[in-house]
Amino acid sequence: MEQDTLEWKILLRPDDSVSRCALRLAMSTSLAEEDALKKALSQLGYRCVVTETGGKSSGDFQEKVTRAVLGASLNAGLVEKVDYEVHALLHATEEAKRCMLFNTASVTSLAVKIAVVRKGHWLAVGLYGDSSIHPTTTHERCGVGTMHI
Protein backbone atom coordinates (compact mmCIF):
# COMPACT_ATOMS: atom_id res chain seq x y z
CA MET A 1 0.00 0.00 0.00
CA GLU A 2 1.34 3.39 -0.96
CA GLN A 3 1.69 5.92 1.83
CA ASP A 4 0.72 9.53 1.41
CA THR A 5 3.68 11.85 1.64
CA LEU A 6 3.99 15.53 2.18
CA GLU A 7 6.93 17.54 0.99
CA TRP A 8 7.58 20.46 3.28
CA LYS A 9 10.08 23.17 2.50
CA ILE A 10 11.58 25.24 5.27
CA LEU A 11 12.28 28.83 4.46
CA LEU A 12 15.55 29.96 6.03
CA ARG A 13 16.45 33.62 5.94
CA PRO A 14 19.74 35.34 6.85
CA ASP A 15 17.88 37.36 9.50
CA ASP A 16 16.25 34.37 11.27
CA SER A 17 16.96 34.32 14.98
CA VAL A 18 19.47 31.79 16.25
CA SER A 19 16.70 30.45 18.52
CA ARG A 20 14.41 29.65 15.60
CA CYS A 21 17.28 27.99 13.76
CA ALA A 22 18.31 25.94 16.80
CA LEU A 23 14.77 24.62 17.28
CA ARG A 24 14.39 23.80 13.58
CA LEU A 25 17.67 21.90 13.64
CA ALA A 26 16.87 20.08 16.90
CA MET A 27 13.53 19.01 15.40
CA SER A 28 15.09 17.44 12.31
CA THR A 29 14.01 13.82 12.00
CA SER A 30 16.69 12.21 9.87
CA LEU A 31 20.40 12.55 9.30
CA ALA A 32 19.74 13.69 5.72
CA GLU A 33 17.40 16.45 6.92
CA GLU A 34 19.87 17.46 9.63
CA ASP A 35 22.75 17.64 7.15
CA ALA A 36 20.68 19.66 4.67
CA LEU A 37 19.69 22.14 7.40
CA LYS A 38 23.27 22.46 8.64
CA LYS A 39 24.47 23.11 5.10
CA ALA A 40 21.75 25.71 4.44
CA LEU A 41 22.42 27.44 7.77
CA SER A 42 26.14 27.50 7.06
CA GLN A 43 25.51 29.18 3.70
CA LEU A 44 23.57 31.90 5.54
CA GLY A 45 26.42 32.56 7.98
CA TYR A 46 25.28 30.45 10.93
CA ARG A 47 27.55 27.95 12.66
CA CYS A 48 25.96 24.92 14.29
CA VAL A 49 26.44 21.54 15.90
CA VAL A 50 24.04 18.75 16.84
CA THR A 51 24.27 16.09 19.55
CA GLU A 52 21.92 13.89 21.59
CA THR A 53 21.55 12.69 25.15
CA GLY A 54 19.02 11.36 27.61
CA GLY A 55 18.44 10.45 31.22
CA LYS A 56 16.13 10.85 34.19
CA SER A 57 14.87 14.31 35.09
CA SER A 58 15.56 13.56 38.75
CA GLY A 59 19.03 12.26 38.06
CA ASP A 60 21.73 12.79 35.51
CA PHE A 61 19.81 14.41 32.64
CA GLN A 62 20.73 18.01 33.45
CA GLU A 63 24.41 17.24 33.87
CA LYS A 64 24.46 15.14 30.68
CA VAL A 65 22.90 17.95 28.65
CA THR A 66 25.41 20.48 29.97
CA ARG A 67 28.36 18.19 29.21
CA ALA A 68 27.02 17.34 25.74
CA VAL A 69 26.44 20.99 24.81
CA LEU A 70 29.80 22.17 26.12
CA GLY A 71 31.76 19.32 24.55
CA ALA A 72 30.06 19.53 21.16
CA SER A 73 30.31 23.33 21.02
CA LEU A 74 34.00 23.38 21.94
CA ASN A 75 34.83 20.52 19.55
CA ALA A 76 32.97 22.23 16.68
CA GLY A 77 34.61 25.60 17.38
CA LEU A 78 31.30 27.35 18.08
CA VAL A 79 32.75 28.79 21.27
CA GLU A 80 36.28 29.37 22.44
CA LYS A 81 37.49 28.12 25.80
CA VAL A 82 37.29 31.59 27.34
CA ASP A 83 35.14 32.53 30.32
CA TYR A 84 32.64 34.88 28.64
CA GLU A 85 31.89 32.50 25.74
CA VAL A 86 31.51 29.41 27.94
CA HIS A 87 29.44 31.47 30.39
CA ALA A 88 26.98 32.54 27.66
CA LEU A 89 26.73 28.97 26.36
CA LEU A 90 26.01 27.58 29.82
CA HIS A 91 23.33 30.21 30.49
CA ALA A 92 21.60 29.42 27.18
CA THR A 93 21.77 25.72 28.08
CA GLU A 94 20.22 26.33 31.51
CA GLU A 95 17.39 28.33 29.94
CA ALA A 96 16.68 25.56 27.42
CA LYS A 97 16.70 22.92 30.18
CA ARG A 98 14.23 24.95 32.29
CA CYS A 99 11.84 25.07 29.33
CA MET A 100 12.29 21.35 28.70
CA LEU A 101 11.84 20.30 32.32
CA PHE A 102 8.98 22.65 33.19
CA ASN A 103 6.24 20.74 35.01
CA THR A 104 7.84 17.29 34.72
CA ALA A 105 7.46 14.54 37.29
CA SER A 106 10.59 13.68 39.23
CA VAL A 107 10.93 10.26 37.56
CA THR A 108 10.52 11.37 33.95
CA SER A 109 12.80 9.78 31.36
CA LEU A 110 13.99 12.08 28.59
CA ALA A 111 15.72 11.55 25.25
CA VAL A 112 16.60 14.72 23.36
CA LYS A 113 18.30 16.01 20.28
CA ILE A 114 20.34 19.14 20.97
CA ALA A 115 21.25 21.83 18.46
CA VAL A 116 23.57 24.74 19.17
CA VAL A 117 23.51 27.57 16.64
CA ARG A 118 25.65 30.69 16.58
CA LYS A 119 25.68 33.75 14.36
CA GLY A 120 27.98 36.58 15.30
CA HIS A 121 27.66 37.27 19.01
CA TRP A 122 24.34 35.42 19.42
CA LEU A 123 24.00 31.76 20.25
CA ALA A 124 21.08 29.48 21.04
CA VAL A 125 20.64 25.99 22.41
CA GLY A 126 17.59 24.08 21.20
CA LEU A 127 16.34 20.86 22.81
CA TYR A 128 13.68 18.61 21.32
CA GLY A 129 12.72 15.09 22.22
CA ASP A 130 10.56 12.66 24.11
CA SER A 131 9.64 12.51 27.77
CA SER A 132 7.76 9.80 29.61
CA ILE A 133 7.02 8.42 33.04
CA HIS A 134 5.83 5.16 31.46
CA PRO A 135 6.11 4.02 27.80
CA THR A 136 2.38 4.64 27.30
CA THR A 137 2.75 8.29 28.36
CA THR A 138 5.50 9.35 25.94
CA HIS A 139 5.11 12.83 24.53
CA GLU A 140 7.28 15.49 22.94
CA ARG A 141 8.89 18.47 24.65
CA CYS A 142 11.10 21.30 23.52
CA GLY A 143 13.14 24.08 25.01
CA VAL A 144 15.33 26.89 23.76
CA GLY A 145 17.76 29.28 25.39
CA THR A 146 19.45 32.30 23.82
CA MET A 147 22.36 34.42 24.97
CA HIS A 148 24.56 37.20 23.65
CA ILE A 149 28.30 36.68 23.86
Image (cartoon, rainbow, N blue to C red):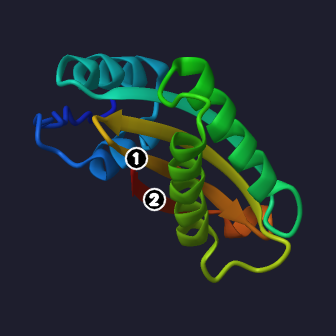
For the point 11% across and 34% down, which residue is it?
14
Rendered view: 39 above or below 143: above
Give the Cα separation between the discs numbered 1 and 2: 13 Å
**Total marks in image:** 2
Coordinates of residue 94 in the picture (x, y in percent): 60, 62
Residue 72 seen in render: yes
Circle 1 crowding by C-alpha within 10 Å: few under 14, some 14–19, many from 20 = some
Q: According to the image, label 1 marks what residue? A: 149
Q: Quadrant of residue 118?
A: top left
Q: SS of the residue at dot 1?
A: loop
The amino acid at mark 1 is Ile
Q: According to the image, label 2 marks what residue? A: 145
For the point 41% across and 17% down, which residue is it?
32
Circle 2 crowding by C-alpha within 10 Å: few under 14, some 14–19, many from 20 = many
Rendered view: 78 above or below 67: above
Pick the residue in front: 8 or 82: 82
